Image (tube, helix red, strand yellow):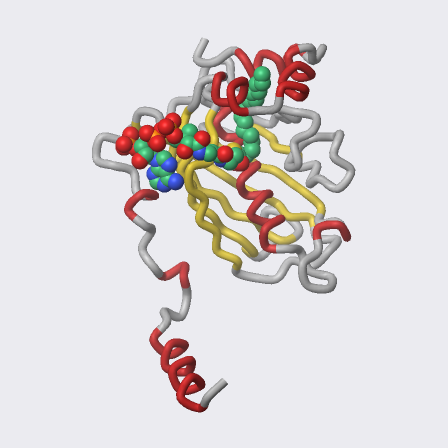
Amino acid sequence: MSTENHHRDDRDRRERPKSAAAEPAPPSLVPPPNALPPVRHPDAPAPGELLGSHYDHCFGCGEGQPHGLHLQARAGDGVTITAEFTVQSAHQGAPGLAHGGVLATALDETLGSLNWLLRVIAVTGRLETDFVRPVPVGTVLFLQAEITAVAGRKIYSRAQGRIGGPDGPVAVRAQALFIEVKVEHFTENGRADEIRAVMSDPDQIRRVRAFEVNP
Ligand SMILES: CCCCCCCC/C=C\CCCCCCCC(=O)SCCNC(=O)CCNC(=O)[C@H](O)C(C)(C)COP(=O)(O)OP(=O)(O)OC[C@H]1O[C@@H](n2cnc3c(N)ncnc32)[C@H](O)[C@@H]1OP(=O)(O)O
């Protein structure tokens, strides 16, 4: 690299904001003026209840994924969720540290679980993640998430992950926009084999979760 490029790199570094967290959220993550507070569905799992996996082969929560996160989400009060996952050796990026994409997955899965408290199926449209601290392998990451607002099909939410438990230091944060979809989103875009398998799932809760959209 030439000396000139070195100088340009130095200047770029100086001009970059110190912390992405200090930046205002992009407009698409700010609820519009007509957004409403989220409404907990009367049949949502009671506060304290484990949600269970929505799909056995889900990388975030499925029991049928040996290297998955096996994240367990629990309903909280209002439209909030807590979740835990233990960072395994298979989740490393740097030696002994969790991969950032895996941490983003944990946030995505926790935020995705929130939508079940509205009894809505929704997919991630936008997920913005701040990585605040390294997360060592073996850590129990304790996640807290809430829906902040709903505007039509758009669901605004945020989450944070703490090291060790609810009082641990914050390691990751996220803001997200989920978009409500119909079941056809999955049936028309997913692979036929997996769709067939899900439709014959004997677990009634999971079937209901997949198909009973806005009862
Ligand atoms: C038989 C089987 C059944 C199985 C059922 C299982 C149910 C289980 C329950 C739940 C599963 C959850 C699984 C958990 C995993 C964690 C969650 C994930 O990781 S999900 C995977 C990652 N995400 C995607 O793959 C989305 C890919 N994207 C899309 O499919 C589309 O882009 C989609 C649906 C998001 C939107 O497309 P449009 O055509 O429906 O709608 P448009 O008009 O484009 O957007 C609607 C509004 O949202 C805004 N929007 C959309 N995307 C945005 C973005 N990226 N940023 C900002 N705004 C966005 C738009 O500007 C628009 O806003 P304005 O109404 O005009 O105000």
- Point 65% across, 24% down: residue: 55
Image spot of residue 201 (x, y percent): 69, 13
Image spot of residue 122 (x, y percent): 46, 27
Point out the residue furthest to the bottom here: 3
Q: Is residue 121 visible?
A: yes
For the residue pair 110 and 165, the one nearer the viewer reads as 110
Q: Is residue 7 left or right of residue 162?
A: left
Q: Is residue 46 visible?
A: no
Query: What quarter of the picture does the C terminus occupy?
Result: top left
Image spot of residue 167 (x, y percent): 59, 51
Work out whether 124 lies above or below 47: below
For the residue pair 80 and 94, the one nearer the viewer reads as 94
For the residue pair 104 and 161, the one nearer the viewer reads as 104
Work out whether 16 lies above or below 194: below
Q: Is residue 100 left or right of residue 36?
A: right
Split into quadrants, the picture shows ligand 1 in the one at: top left
Q: Quadrant of residue 38?
A: top left
- Point 34% across, 59% down: residue: 23
What is the number of callouts on the image? 0
Image spot of residue 87 (x, y percent): 71, 49
- Point 47% across, 31% down: residue: 123
Q: Is residue 124 left or right of residue 34?
A: right
